[in-house]
Amino acid sequence: MKIFPQSTLVFLFFFLIIPFVSSADDNRFTPETVVHLETVTDAVISPDGNKVAYVRRVQRSPDEDRGTAYTEMFVVPATGGEPLQFTFRPHNAATLQWCPSGEYIYFRSNRPEIHRGMQVYRISSKGGEADIVTTESSPVLAYTLSPGGNKLAYILQDPEPDHIRQRTQEGDDWRIEDEFFRHRRVYIKDLTTKETRLVTAFNKSVWAIEWSPDNNKLLIQASPLPTTDHSFMFKKMYLIDAAGTDNPEVFVETEGKLGGMAFSPDGRHVAWQGAIDISDPTEGTIFVANVTSREMWTLTPDFEGTVTWVTWKDNNTLVFTSEEKTWTRMSSIHHSGGERTIIFDERKHPEFTSAQFASDKRTFVAVASAYTHPNEVFAGNIRRKEMNRITFHNPELKDITFQNYEYIEYEARDGLLITGLLLKPVNYREGKRYPLICQIHGGPEAAYTHGWNTTYAAMTQLYSQQGFMVFLPNYRASTGRGVEFAKANHQDGGGKEFTDVIDGVEYLNERGLIDRDRVGIVGGSYGGYFANLGATRYAGNFAAAVNWVGISNQFSKVGMTDTPLENILVHFNRAHYQNQHRIGIMEASPIWYLERAVQEENETPLLILHGEMDARVPYGQAIELYRSLMLSYKHHRGMTRDEIPVTFVSYPRAGHGTGEVRQQLHFSNTVLEFFKKHLKPVELTEYGK
């Protein structure tokens, strides 16, 4: 871990050597508690609706070897009860699926003592040892069982070409960019005969598979190239014969991002999530097409929300979940359109963004959270409109006092309605003004909702217990408000979307809730971009800023990121390298405002944290901002390195985030102490049970 310190922030080194604990002391929510929370990441219900298989994510202890958290499979009765553990660390479990008979649970796992790489395994619904299903030379990237349960479709990436492998083995390991592409292809294994065949021999990369109800066809999403950019922006749907085809035709013409897709039970229609056009930031609209005629229509064209998941209840009815302002909902709608029926409203139920139904199409399971707990398993019934929690991990949380989120809305300076959440300090006292932390979400195609919003990188409940007010704004360009709102920052990056945050701060100040001189800003990715803007373009508005894997130069970032075209098309809606746009792109960049940032009256202490292996917002973005600020402070104000209020922490092996426990603990402790130093909250001494 490289650290670029200054003398006024030497406390950062302290956290490299502190003893780590995994429990909350004196009912205090600590960074150690946050990092070590167990959370459910996947849940599927058996076809008969009686059992639920789920994955629990468990963090490593700090003294273990480096690596990400463990994932373990459990099975629990759908009515609740004691979960039974089916797989154990260090073997991971992912992508669970019940076979139609309910006899087996399929999953992906990496078990090097059995076979190399991630392969598909299955385990009896009664437990026991898992059996390997695929034995491929490369990892299985995704899979799905056929409705009949006798075939397995899965995706493999092409192996490295022989001449490249030979050259590398001989010691010549140079790389020529775009010399070759390793496509992602679909294979089908007959589980009865054990025969495997290649289905997509054509040169496209497949990202998603859906079986037709009759087991004879596959609906796939594929792009011309196997790049992250193409997976975001250039997928098309193809309906192909399960026996394979050499020259598939596009199923229907779509534009922009694609999400989940599903056949109706009779196979006559397909529904999917997609973008309205190429510049739509999300796949948040429902489309339906007739399989025979290929006629398609938009089911939710003017929806003031963002669809997050869709499936069929019967041949005529769709069920979907959606983000709407700061809430999530489940609704049903006729496949030809019309008014929807709201089934679950998060104001009365936990927050969940997808579900999975049993064969009766009424009973379902969802991974859901609330402000008092991270994701757990909930079983529900849409006819009775009820949801019941059936797993109870992290029992230590019951002894900790949490503050509920308050929904807020206010007008931006141009009159646009902005919504968000406010978290008051525990033991909040009316009439007292508190230091404020603005926690900014990334994306920007994302939104804060009323569920669990606390992670090592966004410690909202922990901040509350440390005496901070926490503001979580859903600024323009957020999801949950429809396509027009999501596009509202196009060609204005860092402009009105950022003043939405400042206007929210002023709104809270006018309510008498905050100390305007003690306001901090923190975020990751696009939220880190906001933090950088807060220390540069909008310097003077904040007493401290924390940038986690954030953008500093919008112009250079496009030439370095793994999603250049996605940035151009859905973030800026204009090409960066066209002359007439260059100045506008630079004006949206924090690096453009160095002289403003270093003026004494605007000085904003900035903590920069970045993963050295980040492909989304490359590591050079952090280096560029840090070194530019260091030079600017030295040139304009004659400050020495130890006097400059900028600190840079880099994390080896980390990408666009970190999964290593010691890095997460260091991150959380460092950020918390940074805000305590610069925002000076009054330490709370009473933590109710």
Image (cartoon, rainbow, N blue to C red):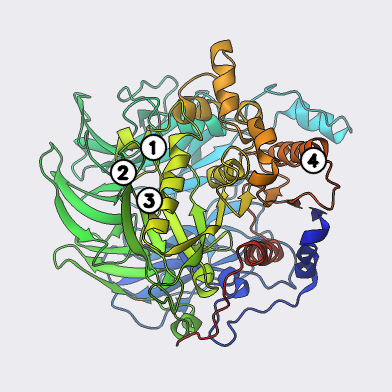
- Disc with the residue nearer the chain's start (4 vs 2): 2
- Disc with the residue nearer the chain's start (4 vs 1): 1
Mark 2–mark 3 distance (CA, rounded to whole Å): 36 Å
- Disc with the residue nearer the chain's start (1 vs 3): 3
- Disc with the residue nearer the chain's start (4 vs 3): 3
The mark lying in front, picked from 2 and 3, is 2
Is the C-beta separation of discs 4 and 2 under 8 Å?
Answer: no
Q: Which mark is residue 336?
A: none
Type of the residue with mark 3: Asn
Is the C-beta separation of discs 2 and 1 under 8 Å?
Answer: yes
Residue 110 appears at what percent x and percent y?
A: 62, 57
Res 201 visible: no
Residue under circle 1?
A: 282
Along the horizontal axis of the image, is 342 left or right of 258?
Answer: left
Along the horizontal axis of the image, is 441 left or right of 556?
Answer: left
Residue under circle 4?
A: 637
Mark 1 surroundings: few (<14), some (14-19) or many (≥20) residues within 10 A: many
Residue beneath the point at 15% across and 46% down: 333
Type of the residue with mark 1: Thr
Residue under circle 2?
A: 306
Nearer to me, 91 or 657: 657
Res 600 visible: yes
Which image quadrant is residue 573 in?
top left
Residue 511 appears at what percent x and percent y?
A: 36, 60
Mark 2–mark 1 distance (CA, rounded to whole Å): 8 Å
The mark lying in front, picked from 4 and 3, is 4
Is the C-beta separation of discs 1 and 3 under 8 Å?
Answer: no
Residue under circle 3?
A: 150
